[in-house]
Amino acid sequence: MKKIITTLILLLGFVISYGQVTDSTNIVVDDPSYQVYTDFTHIVYNMVSNSASEYYYPKLEDKVRNNKSEMTVEECYYLYYGRLFKNEHKGVPFLASSERMDFDKAIARGNCNKIITSGIPLLESNPVDLTVLLHTCKCMNDKKDERWEDYNSLLSKLLNAIFSEGTGQSLETAIKVVDIEDEYIIKGVLGFVGGTEGLYIPKDLPGKVFNVWSKGNQKLYFEELFFEDLKGMKLK
């Protein structure tokens, strides 16, 4: 996986700087500089559920299927975070379907032909599955598949959209993710390989769940949005 992630960074053609974070045995949540954006999910939901919005989710889904290379970073932002409100969204994509489990077996066997042929329909269903997108991109590049450029462009823009929400270097800048597997892809892109993880549920931030990765004097913070109570906010 480390080799694949390294290859991905070279393919994407951009470098994201990751600095060291001072190690601490406690996570401080009462820092006055910390701001809780409690309306984050409501803002995203309003944008993707309103048929008059340019980020109406069916519009984004149609565009990503038919014009991947034309997707903007902002459109990718709402495509990614809007996924939270899909009825079929599980937050644990590798358990979502037998097709996804077959894809994971192809990864384990290093079967690029199978990865591409099974990855494309999976991405039709869920275009923001970073694990599927990463491996499909790598295999397309290895096979000189002419579709590589479009899929790689989508992956790059999705990552930039995600990093626009936070760097992960502190609790207040935690990287917001909609799927648990996305953390592993993002860790690799940032060069944060290995480490130990631990869930953190602050008492004074009800509904917020963080996953904190630690390695030496480095920490990497994720906010796991798929744990949030969306209170009926679902796309039809």
Image: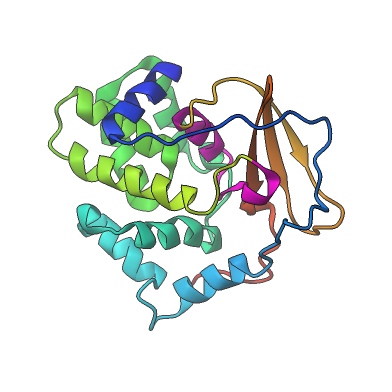
Q: Could you say where residue 202 lies in the image, as x and y percent from the top left? A: 82, 50
In this image, 5 relative to 222: left or right? left
Residue placed most toward the observer, 218 or 73: 218
x, y percent for residue 129: 43, 44
Q: Position of residue 32 (x, y in %)?
A: 78, 58
* Residue nearest the viewer, comparing 57 with 217: 217
Tell me which residue sits at (38%, 83%) in the image.
52
What range of the chain is rendered magenta? 170-189
Q: Which image quarter is the N terminus in? A: top left
Residue 99 appears in the picture as rendered: no
- Residue at screen point 52% across, 76% down: 46
Foreground of the two, 182 or 39: 39
Q: Position of residue 45 (x, y in %)?
A: 54, 71
State how many labels appear.
Answer: 0
Up-down relation of residue 126 to residue 194 (above or below): below
Does the magenta portion include 47? no
Answer yes or no: is residue 205 visible.
yes
- Look at the image and say whether residue 183 sits in the magenta stretch: yes
